[in-house]
Amino acid sequence: MIKDIILPDLGEGIEGAEVSEVAVAPGDTITSEDTILVLESDKASMEIPAEVNGTVTEIAVAAGDEVKTGQILIKIEISESTDAIVEKSVLSEETEQIATSPEKEKPPEVNLYPAIEYTSSTENVFASPGVRRLARELGINLQIIKGSGPKRRVTKDDLNGYIKLQMAMSAGSIPAPQPVIDFSQWGDVEVQKLTKIKRITGERLQRAWQLIPHVTQFDAADITDLDALRKEVKKAGAKKGIKVTFLPFLMKALSIVLKEMPEFNSSLDHNNENLVLKNYYHLGIAVDTPRGLTVPVVRDVDQKSVFELSDELMDLSSRARDKKLKPNELKGGTFTISSLGGIGGTGFSPIVNPPEVAIMGVSRSAWKKVYDKVSREFVAKFIMPFSLSYDHRVIDGAAAAAFTSRFADVLSDLDHFKD
Amino acid sequence: MGELRQTELVVIGAGPGGYAAAFRAADLGKQVLLIDRDPELGGVCLNRGCIPSKALLHISKVMDEVTKLEKMGVKYGKPEIDIDQVRDHKNKIVSQLNSGIVQMAKARKVETIQGLASFVSNTELKVQTDTNDVTITFGQCIIAGGSTSAMIPGVPTDHPSVITSRTALDLEDIPEKLLVVGGGAIGLELGQVYAAFGTKVSVVEYLPNLLPGTDSDLVKPLQRKLKKQCEAIQLSSKVTKVEANKDGTLTVTIKNEKGSSTEVFNKVLVSVGRKPNTGLLNIEATDVKVNDRGFIQVDVYQRTSEKNIFAIGDIVGDPMLAHKATHEGKVAAEVASGHPAAFDVRAIPSVVYTDPEVAWAGLTETNAKENEIPYEKGEFPWSASGKAIAMGANQGKTKILFDPETKQVLGVGIVGPGAGDMISEGMLAIEMGADAEDVGLTVHPHPTLSETVGLAAEAFTGTITDLYLQKK
């Protein structure tokens, strides 16, 4: 049986298109999914599948031809009976019949069935006829929607909300499916499963990256004096068995600046209509563990001494590595610090940890030659590069620059650390 | 040589379902041909059913109201009936509505062809008009062929004194004695019309109840009224023979438990139900499936088993009601035009336009008991309604059936004047999923008959103050 493959309705009001490529030749054996033609309309380029299995006997169009819906494209000797064939032959019979009718130019429209098969599943749903109709038009099963109306009636708003959620999910956090790539074709590979922490963190980071308009401000602080102070404190701490790093000093300094500039210690509310300023200073500390990144929270940093903070940090990071943090210790942060100072690097732009609005990234301090205006000489200074990523919906660039300058000032003024 | 035509959509039958389908499809951009075998559009409903019968029932109801006035101190004389003028009045109403449909068809550029349509194939049909044969090739078809009065064996169908609802509404004369065979809605409505004009009316019903299938408490007030208006009402009885006499009268043999009896009537109205007009369409030429009762089988999209042919209204099954056909017609037109519509209704209301009217929507008690569907009930007797008493309508009743769990309205039944108009509130409640509180807390105007709906709900929730009910 020879089957004419006609140009199906392309939808969206497209009546015709130009053939940009003919992908088959007479004698070719093709399967139903093979592309026979590529078309180019003013809106898009489309591949036309064969829809039947068989052998190409004739090609009725050539590249550059303008083709219209219903026009015969190629003829195929069918090798196998499929449902698709039955469907198509019905379609083409109608087309033929239309073609022989002399009076009308436009053929009677082929019956369009609703895409969604009706189910009686609206029966126990509490929704008005109008909402039931809208749901049917949109192909939404009302059974799965939680009604927000009186007595849990499903309202039109509920449908709209559901659609918005679906759109956000498909356009946003769920990335488009990636092509499957066999990497072993280029060399030896090893597959390692992502840890649960890595996967969860990955999702959260992606969401934060997509939702928050990020800007990163870079700066550097002179911590020459602070370094000297820290060495003293470290010795004192060693006697008590407390390991003192730079971090507690940075935390103290941050709590001071956050108090002065409260919008850095805030969150947007769920409607993005109000800013919630927090009168507590709980700092999240990004801790690298063998299983991935965790961010335990140190509470009330402003009320704690450097020793207390050091003690707490030791405890948190060791328990973080041993998976012994309590869920509560990972919540309630108002600002996060991510320090790579112990590792290296001259600067990086961290991702804000929502619902917080800013995060500080600390890089490796180094001795630099700095020109001293007073003595008119180059002097050696211990410089700590750091960065501040912030949510630009909440924080302006000028405020961010002021924040980093002030932070650098606080670090260079040792009065702040005497307690 | 016949004429050849081609159209996107052809609609067979211009009744309330057919013209709704044709007009809706035209509004959605289809090229539509509307075929009807009658010269007038509107089908049985407009020309030989709902509308003319309502014109006559209005007259008979007012006549009955006038006689009630005698007890209230207002007396008119004996009514004088000019049957020709009555007939003219009725015809005028029908033709007024006819011309309305014609105008609407023109405005929408829906072309009409008068003639009997019969299928040639799944995409072609032939219409025999007065002058020629027209062959129509169509992309899609909506069958709205309607129904015809059913007859019973033993009754000569061609005798002029044997009438159906159609000929009864022609109102040829006022017979002295009329036998109504079949105590359903149509028979009782027409029986009351003729009784008001002075005919001695008898009713024979094969089943033990009038309005078979209807809740007996709703039928009771009507039955009481009919007993006064009619010569005789014979239930569980069967007409076995109708013989024509030389003087034009008919001798009817009626059989029941007690035995057989014969009686002479001037006319016999056969109103034993309606049968679909499927047989007129040469449907065998298509792949459309028809069930053993002659109804065309359709799905919720009104699609038949042949994908470009739709069917709606009486020809697809019970209930054979104009408002069902209209809604189905619109669904068919929308689906045919590519819209995802479906006939997705929770209920279809039924109204018997007798005096008193009987109306119900959704679940009935009869149905609930047959199918063991649990329900609870709120009732309000009109004997406690000021408005009903003032109107002399204290025999009426309003009841609502509720879901025992959710208290949502499952069904509403009303008997009394205006029941048909009031049932709409029940329909809205059912479609909106309203519960007893929703109906009871809705402020109904006082004094009205419609407030009985709210009061029936309040009787159920126990918040009613117009009745004293024992605590549940």
Image (cartoon, coloured by chain):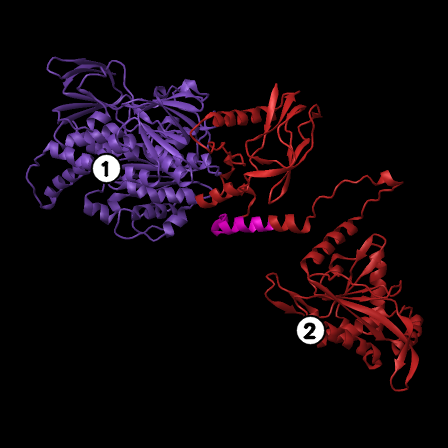
Chain colours: A red, B purple
Q: Can you identify the residue that label 2 sits on?
A: A262
Task: Point out which mark residue A318 bears.
Answer: none
Residue B212 image offset from top left, x and y in percent: 31, 27
Give the amino acid type for the residue marked by disc 1 in the picture: Pro
Badge 1 marks a residue whose secondary structure is loop
In the shown orientation, is residue B419 left or right of residue A243?
left
Give the amino acid type for the residue marked by disc 2 in the picture: Pro
Predominant SS of the magenta segment: helix
Density class for disc 1 (Cα within 10 Å; few <14, some 14-19, many ≥20) is many
In the shown orientation, is residue B278 left or right of residue B194?
right
Q: Can you identify the residue that label 1 sits on?
A: B356
Q: Which of B121 and B87 is in front in this view?
A: B121
Can I make out residue B231 in this image? no
Of the 4 image quadrants, the one containing the C terminus of chain B is: top left
User: In which quarter of the view is residue A309 placed?
Assistant: bottom right
Whether marks 1 and 2 lie on the same chain: no
Tell which subunit mark 1 falls on: B
The residue at the far bottom in this view is A374
- At 11% from the left and 24% from the top, the residue drawn is B176
Residue A314 image offset from top left, x and y in percent: 86, 64
Whether residue B369 appears in magenta in the rendering, the answer is: no
Q: Nearer the viewer, residue B389 or B163?
A: B163
Of the 4 image quadrants, the one containing the N terminus of chain B is: top left
Q: In this view, does B395 lie above or below B260?
A: below
| Magenta segment boundaries in residue numbering | A147-165
